[in-house]
Amino acid sequence: MSVIAVDGIAYQTDLPYRYVFEPHELAAIRSCNLEHGFCVVKQVITPELVDALKQSVRETLIGDNPLKPGETRVHLHFVEFSPPLTSLLENEPYMAIARVLYGEDLTVHRTAAIVKNVGCRYGGWHSDWSFPEGRITHASEWLNTREGCYSLWFYLNGTHPSRAGLALMPDSHRMDWQAPEGFQFTPGRRSFHKVGSDTNGYAGMDVPGLLPLLTEPGDLIVFAERTYHGVFPHNGDEVRLSCGIGFRPGRTPYPVPWPVPESAVAFKTGVPERLQPLVEQYVGIEPNWPIDGGRPSP
């Protein structure tokens, strides 16, 4: 049994099943994600590409504007500004994993990059899916109404619970999954909170059943849109950099209430012809889309 202790709490990192795979184990990767809602794939990209992605994240999210202590910044359409991330669309080990999860026909749905400076507090527990009973409140939630949209994330410094590492709840992608013992879902099931406390999403790592992920730069973290996940505080010594792409199955239009932004149009136009099928139905995101409470058509 492998156990790691953080802030006086012991976390088990072994499960009764494998969840860490090599890139060629495609059938096992698909099976683990369908059954348990997540997996880790070792060394999907080279150290050179890791470095290029790190530089791209720094340039796009930090640039000449230094981070404040404990600051987090997020970019919600990173692929439109990052040639290294776009290059993943021609990276065969990576795309083989994407195809086994989504099918041969797939579309770039959304992308992001995140930086977390030393001193960041907990990242609250949430899923990346807008449950039907919830109300849409912003553009990101609108994009999160499509089932089957796994997140494929690279934690470019690796991930460890001592430095803003990712934790998740295995099997929580199932529609019949119940909130952890002593907790109940928030309205709309976007998160959960302690019974008897306020109904905001919980930010803490004393949740029964959580799994902290331990990865190295170049490892790929995959989790389903309904898998609940949270982030440990950042007690390390370097800025945490991460980025990822979320595809969606199929190549049909996705209804959104905003016109495709100019940056998304430029990205789609600039992608080589051989990659056009992957981006033809990409819609980008308008973060300032006004709230209207609507939902896209099924």
Image: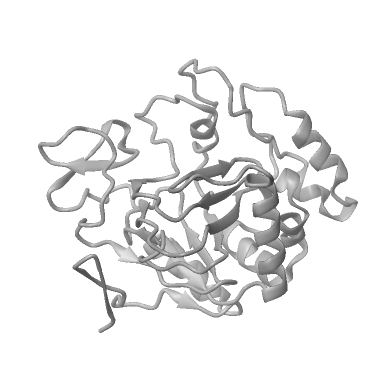
Q: Residue at x 64, y 62 (%)?
A: 99
217 relative position to 125: left or right? right
Which one is in front, 266 or 32?
266
Is residue 46 visible to us here? no
Vertical order, 218 against 244 (above or below)? below
Residue at far left of view: 196
Vertical order, 157 against 72 (above or below)? below
Q: Residue at x 65, y 61 (%)?
A: 54
Residue at far right of view: 273
Q: Residue at x 61, y 79 (%)?
A: 24
Instruction: Give percent across and percent down for residue 86.
Output: 75, 55
Quadrant in the picture for residue 104: bottom right
Q: Quadrant of the N terminus?
A: bottom left
10 relative position to 138: left or right? left
Q: Residue at x 14, y 36 (%)?
A: 197
Vertical order, 23 against 87 (above or below)? below
Colour pattern of the rendering: one colour
Instruction: Give percent across and percent down for residue 95.
Output: 68, 64
